[in-house]
Structure formats: C-alpha cells, structure tokens
Image (cartoon, helix red, strand yellow):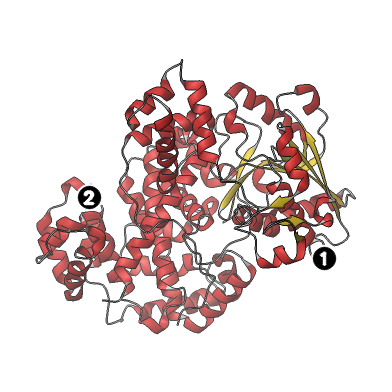
Amino acid sequence: MPVETQKFSPTAPKKMEEHDPVYLKIRDVVYQACGIYHSEEKLYLLSGACKRRMPNTKASDARQYLELLGAPATRPVEMRELLNEITIGETCLFRSPPQLAALQNVVLPELIAARSKIGLRKLKIWSAGCSTGEEPYTLSMFLLEQSEKLLRGWAFEITATDLNDRSIETAKAGIYGDYALRNTSEHFKRKYFKSVEGEKLQVREEVKAPITFSRLNLSDDSKMLFVKSMDLIFCCNVLIYFDVASKRRVISHFYSGLQAPGYFFMGPAESLYQVSDQFRLVHLPGTTTYVKALPGSTGASVAGASKS
Amino acid sequence: MITAANLELRKRVEKLRALPSSPAVLKPLLELLRQPADNISLERVVQLVSYEKTIAAQLLRIANSPLYGRASPAESIQAAISTLGIQRIEDILVGNCIGNLIPHDKWVVDPGVFWRHSFGCALVCREFAERIAYPDIEKAYLAGLLHDIGIIVNSLAYTEDYRAVLAAAVQTGRPLDEQEQETLGFTHCDSGVLLAKTWQLPAAIAEVIEWHHDVTRGPQGNALIAIVHLGDLLCRLRGLGYGYEEWRAIDLQADAAWVELAKHLPKIADIDLARFTLDLDAYVVRITSLVDEIFSPA
C-alpha cells in the first residue's frame, strides 16, 4: 500500500461550466485596471458579480456590460461598483488558511531567525485596510496560539488601519456572527471568544490587547512616512480600488515601512505585476507573498530557497 | 561518480528490464506524442490502442462517462477517440503503459498523487514553454510527463526503503530528492536516467530526468531541463506535488533555471508569474478529473 500522505483537497467545483468568452475579456479588463485576477476556476465569481450588477445598469448582457467598463464616462463608477460586488461577503476570520499555514511553517521561523540575530524579540505587524477587524483579529489569535510555541518569549503588536471610521468602530467592538465566523474552528471560538447579544461572539480582551486601531488614508503620504520597521504587512483587496500611480506610491511606502527581510501579503488573487520592481514575488505552498530582501541578497536566499 | 549505492542501484535497475509488463506500446507512443496534434492520424492511434487490450475497454468506459455527456453511447474505438480527443488518449496510454509496470502493492507514492504530479507538470511545462516561445512545446509536455519516472524505479526496486524515505519527507516537509539522497545515497534522478537509457528515451528527455533537480550541474544548452525544473517546482507549490507540503519559500525568478532561460529566451521577462500561478489552480481541477478517469476502478 502507498504511504499515507497528507491528502490535499482541490476545493474547486468538479466540472467547470462553459463561460461566455466575454467574461474572459472582462476578467482581463478588471485585472489590468485593478490587479485582481480570476483564473478559470474562479471565473464564476466574476460572472456572478457582473450579473448582479447588470440590472442596475443599462447593460442587458455581458457584452454591453463590458462596454460600460470600457467607456470613459461610465468606467470609474462601474468599475468601483463591480469591485464592491466582487469582494462583498469575502471578508471573514481565518479567510486564507494557506496564508496562515505558510506564516507558521516558513515566514515566522525565517523572521524569528533574522530578528534574533540583531537582538530583537518583538514583531510588528500592519493590517492596512483592516475593514471591520477580521484580519487583525485573525492575526492576533494566530500569533497568540504561537506564543507558547514559535514565539515563546516574543512580543508582537498589530497596527490596524482603515479609511472608514465606521469600519474602525465595528472593528474595535469585535463582535461577529456566523457568516464572519464560518472559517473559525471550535477551538478558536472557545478559546478566544465570548458569547454576546443574540447568537453572536465577541473577541476576548487578550485578542484585542495587541491591536491598535486607527483611521488612516493610505494615500496620505505624510502619515504613511511614519510607518516604520514593520516585519509583516497585510493589505488584502484594498489596492484594487487604486489607480496604478497611487498604487505605486502606496506600495513604495509599504516597501520603506518594512524592515528587511520583511513580507508583504496581498489577497490571494491580487498581483503586483508591473506595479513594483522592488518587492520580490515569492512562492509558498498554496500561496504567494512579496519579500523585501536584505541588501545584497537575492530574494531566494532571504527566503531560504534550496537548490531544488 | 560511481559510489557503492550507485553500483547497487545499477544492478537492481538492470533486473527491472526483465519485468513481464515491459511497455511494448511505449516507444511508438512516445514517437506519436512528439508530433504536433494536427499531424497525428487516427489510424495510428487506433493501432496503438489495440496494443493493450484492456485499454480499449477503458477508453470506451471513459468516453461514455457522464463527464463527456454523449447523446448516444460510443460503441467503437474510433467513436471513443473522437469523444476524448487525441491528447487525452495519449495521456491515458502513457499512464497505463507506465503505471502497469508497478503491481499495486509496490506503489510507494500514491498512484493518484504520482499521476497528478506528472500530468500536472506536463501541462505546466507545455504552457510555460509556449509563453516563453520555446520552439518545441510538445517535447516540453513529454519531458514534464516523464521527468519523475525514477520514482517508479525506486518504488519497484527499493519498495520498503522507499516507503521510509517518503514517510520521512512527509514528516519533515523536505523535498523528496533531498531525503532520497540522505537515506538511499541516490535520488530518483539517478534511478530515472538508468531507466530512460534502458528504454532508449530521447537524449534530451533523459537529461531532464537526470538533472531536473540540479540545473546548474546539468549539461548546457538543453532548455528543457530548466523548464521542467520550474514547472516541477510550481506544481509542488500549488497542490500538485507528492501529496505533502514542502515548507519553504521559493523565488522562482531568482532561481538558476529562470536566469539560464532568460539568457536564451528573452520572452520569459514578459511572464506575469503571479497570474500564471493563479492559472495553475484551474489545472488542479482538470488534472484531478483526468487522473480520476484513468485510474478509477472499472
């Protein structure tokens, strides 16, 4: 019998439906404008978002909708509406298990080794565009879990920022329902949440304690300059709303805000292609990240790649 | 370098030649695979299919599976072939004639995992080769498909030791070839190239089998080695590996193979690697259904 190995489970649907080829064009338009990419098996998410938008527009089919996304008069508004539709309901705690697994098995050990060399025992993490708090709380719980393992004797602090005041207020409260908790294991629910009003759960104080929430506009250059010596930056599904020039500015702030070697994580479908030539794209099992390498080293050696 | 482990390996592989299920269909099949799809004649394929009696029945079963949604059942080999398409027939034939070499109890790596990796790598290599304008994309497919045949040799000739190798690699998340080197004293590259020579595979493919984990020490001027090296890494990082995660970070664009390819195939600089990687996730679905089709019990 074959040796029993960890079974990976491709989660995508069994059979791919045939798509109207127009959606491939819409996919490319969206990718060029926003840097969010829908591969073949995710195309149904994009076509679904377009179909939900169409009744609110003059477009009655995909081809006409593509025209709306192309025409200078309608493009800016419709693109934003479409992006809202694409990202709606995506936010939840523990949204990207491969990201957390890679953090635990590759990134944290790398960071701990690098920072120990210079006598540091504290990690600084920035959740940029934290929306209603799901991402910083996930990171806080994840790191608390590690505090008796990888991070024994280490401290960490999480800076969580968003442009929207109301999101920040919701985030600070830390109260979530079933939908936001759909990826959260019973272990984490029991350990890090308490029951509140109705059927909802609220994160405990120890999860909130390492996080500082504040309002920040990523386009505000003067404020961005203050962010320094971060170890990890997360910015998921935020830059898709920026034009290329603003995106480049934000990314270069992120780059200078990171201490090398430092890691920048985006949403799983986002790409910095032709946006940054400073960050190195690095592959981890099931996910990717961008690395600010130590001066003089290639991204490969920073990230500990081996010959094979 | 001839070491004791290598010598022992050579002896064991030479014995493998005497296997009863030596694949008669393999040589003509590989020649066929080297042709651009348009040049392949249906008659030739039908002839190949007839080499192995069980294959004909299998092709009919697959062609009539709900996946292909035929209005009326395919009753002839020709009908099955036109339903499945030449490419899929070739994949099924290769999977069968190589897969049948191993009795079920000798598989160490799960056969489904092995074939997902092999077909996945073949697809990725062809796609990658096309995007960087490598002139012979079918050869890239073939090289990707066969690059790990050493794993079959190890499973056959060293079954018990190889189980220990895989278990240790799974445990530590190490690359398989590193664990092989440590435990066995040789890798599936060393054993694979011996089989490639026994089977008289084309020299370029044999070089890929031998050097895909060690591009810098391999022969110069065979871009296929670098293509397969990168395709193999991508597969292993995207759920089409050996059935376990290898916990490391890889900067593919800083990899020696990428740098080498960039010298001769400048179009590689235009590749949007983030997008290419996301496209792979669709392959996982396609490959899984292909492998399920080939290996699901009749």
Q: Secondary structure at mark 1?
A: loop
Which residue is more in the foreground, B124 or B153? B124
Identity of the residue drawn at 75% across and 49% down: A174
Q: Is residue B259 above or below residue A223?
A: below
> Mark 2 sits on what residue?
B35
Give the image location of residue B100, x and y in percent: 30, 76
Q: Residues within 10 Å of mark 1 (few under 14, many from 20)?
A: few
Chain letter for the residue marked with disc 1 in the picture = A
> Mark 1 sits on what residue?
A148
| Three-letter residue code for mark 1 | Glu
Which residue is more in the foreground, A160 or A294? A160
Q: Secondary structure at mark 2?
A: loop
Identity of the residue drawn at 23% across and 58% down: B68
Q: Is residue A52 above or below residue B96?
A: above
Q: Are marks 2 and 1 in contact (CB under 8 Å)?
A: no
Give the image location of residue A154, x and y in percent: 86, 56
